[in-house]
Amino acid sequence: MITHDLRVIADAILDKKGQDVISIDLRPVGSAIADYFVICNATSTTAVSAIADNIIKEAKEQLGMKPLRTQGQENNFWVILDYGHIVIHIFLTEYREFYRLEDLWADAPRKTYKYRKPAAKKKEDVLPEE
């Protein structure tokens, strides 16, 4: 189910125009921090905030998860959402380029996420107009 959790988080990021979304599997490198990091960036503090808010909303609605801790929402340069097994890092683009967090975990397996078009509604899902 962890792949489903990661996909829900990635989709929440991509829905708000997050960029360069990756997950890093920290389990093979023996990290005690979390099982996975999800990392992305955005071009403005407004976008960073919107991404964080959307992740919190979608994780609660779709996965029943609330963050254990959050950090960085006072300035939105680098927001961290800690769900225990998954820690999400949302960077302002220049901060991601400066800190290069994923380089610290270069040996860990990673996955890149791309935007998926929402599924088309089936004819029977659409209510007829009255």
Image (cartoon, helix red, strand yellow):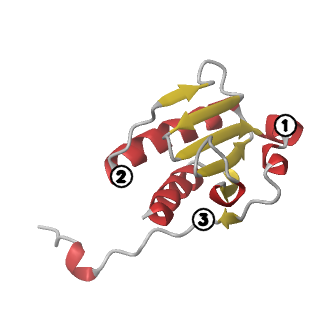
Amino acid identity at mark 3 = Tyr
* Of labels 2 and 3, the one closer to you: 2
Relative to 83, is 126 on the left or the right? left
Say which residue appears at 57% left-offset and 48% top-offset: 16
The answer for how far apart the CA atoms under marks 2 and 3 are is 20 Å
- Residue under numbered circle 2: 63
Say if mark 2 contacts mark 3, CB within 8 Å: no
Which of these two is toward me, 60 or 121?
60
Q: Residues within 10 Å of mark 2 (few under 14, many from 20)?
A: few
Q: Residue at x 70, y 31 (%)?
A: 78
Q: Mark 1 and mark 2: span between their CA atoms?
A: 30 Å
Q: Position of residue 86 (x, y in %)?
A: 54, 47
Q: Quadrant of residue 66?
A: top left
| Mark drawn on residue 41 | none
Q: Which residue is mark 3?
A: 115
Taking 109 as reference, is 70 left or right?
Answer: left
Amino acid type, callout 1: Tyr
Q: Secondary structure at mark 3?
A: loop
Q: Residue at x 46, y 68 (%)?
A: 118
Indicate which disc, 1 or 2, sits on the residue closer to the N terminus: 2
Give SS at disc 1: helix
Quarter of the image that includes the N terminus:
bottom left
CB under 8 Å between discs 1 and 2: no
Residue 95 x/y as whole percent: 81, 34
Q: Which mark is residue 99?
A: 1
Identity, as a three-letter code, of the amino acid under mark 2: Leu
Image coords of residue 80 (percent x, y): 61, 33
First reached walking from the N terminus: tag 3 or tag 1: 1
Residue farthest along the top direction in this orientation:
74
Q: Residues within 10 Å of mark 1 (few under 14, many from 20)?
A: few
Residue furthest to the left in view is: 130
The vertical placement of 130 against 31, above or below, is: below
